[in-house]
Amino acid sequence: MNELQSWLTNIKRWYQPREHRNTNILVNAISNAPNAVFGPIETNEHSEALAYWLDACHRLSTYYQNKSGLDKAFSYLQFPYAKLQEMACNPELDMVMKRWCLKKLDRMIVAMTEFCQRQPDTRWQHENAQLIELHVSFMQGQNDLNLSYSSLAGSN
């Protein structure tokens, strides 16, 4: 069993009924994800691993929001956003995958700004303004690949 398969087996444990409340499984999976999760998607296993990793980040963000751990909850939104930015800039990834990453970033920035807007503290409103400004700047540097439909039509 290779590193990616082993990691995938471990994260899938959390989805079992008895393990569902053990957030340590998700924390460890996110922290110890092999680099292959974020590289070129060559197999269904790679795709599945990335989906599980993103879902784990989302679930931990929700978990910490419910526990009033806003900074930690927000960090589990920021981390996958940063990883997707890294993937979008990876020269080893094909254009279809880069476009997918950029489209996912567009969706994630919405979730991050909604998170900030729900918080009563003004520091979150400042964070929100910075997020939008930095996202727009990053996307401009990607030559609107997230909006390009020419040869990539039909891909999500």
Image (spheres, rainbow, N blue to C red):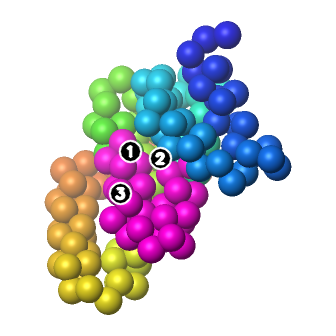
- Whether residues under marks 1 and 3 lie with C-beta atoms below 8 angstroms apart, the answer is no
Q: Name the amino acid, label 3.
A: Ser
Q: Residue at x 72, y 37 (%)?
A: 13
Disc 1 to disc 3, C-alpha distance: 14 Å
Residue tagged by mark 3? Answer: 75
Answer whether labels 3 and 2 touch (C-beta < 8 Å): no
Q: Provide the secondary structure element on which disc 3 rests.
A: helix
Return the x and y of residue 61 as percentages of the image width and height: 48, 61
Q: Earlier in the sequence, mark 2 or mark 1?
A: 1
Q: Where's residue 148, x and y in %?
A: 39, 53
50 with respect to 74 (left or right): right
**Mark in front: 2 vs 1:** 1
Q: Give the number of the mark in front: 3 or 2.
A: 3
| Residue 63 on the magenta span | yes
Residue 58 visible, this orientation: no
The residue lying at 44 percent from left, 36 percent from top is 31
* 47, 52: nearer the viewer: 52
Most frequent secondary structure within the magenta stretch: helix
User: Helix, strand, or loop for circle 1?
Assistant: helix
Q: Is residue 32 visible?
A: yes
Q: Residue furthest right?
A: 17
